[in-house]
Amino acid sequence: MKKTESNTKNEVSPVDEEKRDFLFVTTAGLAIAGGAVTAVSLINTMNPAKDVLALSTTEVDLSPVEEGQSLTVMWRGKPIFIRHRTKDEIDSAKNVAENDLIHKASDDSRVENPKWLVVVGVCTHLGCVPLGQKIGDNKGEFGGWFCPCHGSHYDTSGRIRKGPAPLNLEIPPYKFVSDDIIKIG
């Protein structure tokens, strides 16, 4: 009896080989498909959400802002100061020697259109929001913005002129879509 048992164990029928190949191909195919689905799901979770994409750019209508007025809009959770500068503000910003500045930058390098100044309204010292946007606010010694927390003074071009802030107010990426509309971001 031992001979017949060993003979049947050694002999593999062609049906068994076909079953084994089918099971191998099916298992491999399902593993590859499962891996692909998992990879796509993982990659999609790393994409920004729709609310984040909506905040990536914002358009601002400047037509209601009269000369000498300021506007504050939010972009990516930061206040953006937009000022319609008067001729005196433009002249005072242009007439400053770059050697007198803490963080050297000309007025022309900070604006696309001299009438409009667009800056991120966050003090570069410790991240406070400077005063100077509202009528009656202290605009500092140079007519721009004043951060009362530690005494930083910014001029009408958003450049640091006095105080502990090391850098000028940041310029966000923006462009004029038309004469009265800018796109920030």
Image (spheres, helix red, strand yellow):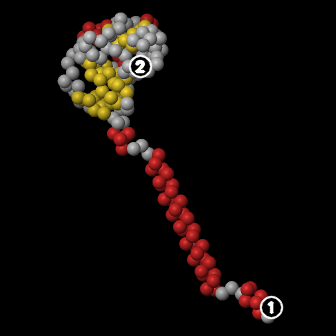
Which residue does the image show at 21% across and 16% down from the upper left? 67
Which residue does the image show at 21% across and 21% down from the upper left? 65
Q: Residues within 10 Å of mark 1 (few under 14, many from 20)?
A: few
Give the amino acid type for the residue marked by disc 1 in the picture. Answer: Lys
Observer-nearest residue: 159 or 38? 38
Q: Mark 1–mark 2 contact, CB under 8 Å?
A: no
Disc 1/disc 2 C-alpha distance (Å) = 91 Å
Give the amino acid type for the residue marked by disc 2 in the picture. Answer: Cys
Vertical relation: 39 (above or below) 140: below
Q: Position of residue 26 (x, y in %)?
A: 55, 72
Name the secondary structure under disc 1: helix
**According to the image, label 2 marks what residue?**
128
**According to the image, label 1 marks what residue?**
2
Q: Residues within 10 Å of mark 2 (few under 14, many from 20)?
A: some
Which residue does the image show at 27% across and 22% down from the upper left? 71
- The quadrant in which the N terminus is found is bottom right
Q: Which mark is residue 170?
A: none
Q: Position of residue 96 (x, y in %)?
A: 37, 7
Q: Is residue 38 visible?
A: yes
Drawn side of residue 143 relative to residue 18, left or right: left
